Image (tube, rainbow, N blue to C red):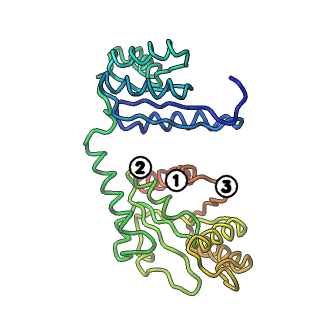
């Protein structure tokens, strides 16, 4: 590959493309020397759709990753890519081959099968509705229905982390920790919900808060909201509160939302196991 600052990445799916996009981005993230310019094609389910995709690839040649269940469509895309001299790969084929070898059965060939409207799907929808309704301390009288409760000062990624957890089927509520504002009484009655404190470094919090104030054209002068010493005290209060209550703390300073959620899920599953053990 010639040195450049970017390359074209074509992601072709006969469903929503969620799986393919995640795989493509995970792979592209391993290469700092070039930035992927994504071209995403979803619900590609006819020869006409394939023809349109090939035209786009011809205009901007690059790497082609695809998930196409229909063999005819996959063959058509593969042949077109060979003619154009661009690399193409079915990201599911090696996995399906492994499953077939181990299970001794062929796959069902259903596009978007992972999005079936089953019990798990509706559990995620229910969790998402709950999380959106219990964001930023709302409906604190219903906290006993939560699976996970996140606590943290402003700008510790409580809301996006809660939403990510909801997409994993976890009912997550989040509560802001504000100086001199008492916590909801309902927290004292928690018996099943798993409570986690989120913190970050003062520098990181101040940076994010400054950007937030600038984005809404707010005055950034003489405010404790972005004073480093005041923020450090807020974080110290969080630490003391969680230590006193026996709640675990996760530092999100250098964690992505996905990494924070993964850490929470690990702790939550351990918590559940302990509760279920006689």
Q: Position of residue 185 (x, y in %)?
A: 43, 81
For label 3, count other residues whose C-alpha is less than 10 Å away and answer few (under 14), some (14-19) or many (20+): few
Q: Residue at x 42, y 69 (%)?
A: 135
Q: Position of residue 44 (x, y in %)?
A: 34, 29
* Residue 114 horizontal side relative to residue 247, left or right: left
Give the number of callouts.
3
| Residue nearest the observer in this picture, 258 or 67 | 67
Mark 2 vs mark 3: which is more N-terminal?
2
Q: Which residue is drawn at 73% across and 76% down?
A: 228
| Residue nearest the observer in this picture, 258 or 240 | 258
Local secondary structure at mark 2: loop
Mark 1 vs mark 2: which is more N-terminal?
2
Q: Which residue is drawn at 40% across and 77% down?
A: 186
Label at residue 168 = 2
Q: Where is residue 181 in the image (x, y as percent from the top left)?
A: 53, 85
Residue that label 1 marks: 261
The alpha-carbon separation of the residues under discs 1 and 2 comes to 10 Å
Mark 1 vs mark 3: which is more N-terminal?
3
The alpha-carbon separation of the residues under discs 1 and 3 comes to 13 Å
Label at residue 42 = none
State whether residue 42 is above or below residue 222.
above
Local secondary structure at mark 3: loop
- The quarter in which the N terminus is drawn is top right
| Residue nearest the observer in this picture, 213 or 163 | 213
Residue that label 3 marks: 254
For label 1, count other residues whose C-alpha is less than 10 Å away and answer few (under 14), some (14-19) or many (20+): many
The answer to whether marks 1 and 2 mark residues whose Cβ atoms lie closer than 8 Å is yes
* Residue 52 horizontal side relative to residue 209, left or right: left
- The quarter in which the C terminus is drawn is bottom left
């Amino acid at each position: 590959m010639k040195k450049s600052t970017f390359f074209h990445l074509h992601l072709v799916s006969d469903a929503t493309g969620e799986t393919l996009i995640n795989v493509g981005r995970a792979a592209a993230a391993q290469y700092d020397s070039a930035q992927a310019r994504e071209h995403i094609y979803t619900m590609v389910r006819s020869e006409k759709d394939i023809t349109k995709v090939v035209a786009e690839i011809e205009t901007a040649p690059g790497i082609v990753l695809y998930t196409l269940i229909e063999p005819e469509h996959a063959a058509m895309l593969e042949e077109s890519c060979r003619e154009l001299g661009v690399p193409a790969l079915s990201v599911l084929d090696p996995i399906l081959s492994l499953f077939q070898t181990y299970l001794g059965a062929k796959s069902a060939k259903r596009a978007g099968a992972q999005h079936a409207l089953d019990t798990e799907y509706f559990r995620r929808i229910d969790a998402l509705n709950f999380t959106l309704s219990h964001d930023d301390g709302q409906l604190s009288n219903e906290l006993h229905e939560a699976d996970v409760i996140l606590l943290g000062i402003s700008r510790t990624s409580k809301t996006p982390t809660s939403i990510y957890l909801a997409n994993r089927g976890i009912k997550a509520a989040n509560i802001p920790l504000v100086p001199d504002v008492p916590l909801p009484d309902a927290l004292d009655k928690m018996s099943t919900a798993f409570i986690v404190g989120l913190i970050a470094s003062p520098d990181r919090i101040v940076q994010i808060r400054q950007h937030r104030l600038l984005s809404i054209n707010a005055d950034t002068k003489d405010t404790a909201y972005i004073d480093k010493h005041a923020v450090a005290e807020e974080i110290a209060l969080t630490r003391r509160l969680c230590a006193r209550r026996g709640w675990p703390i996760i530092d999100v300073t250098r964690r992505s939302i996905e990494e924070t959620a993964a850490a929470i899920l690990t702790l939550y599953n351990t918590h559940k196991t302990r509760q279920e053990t006689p």
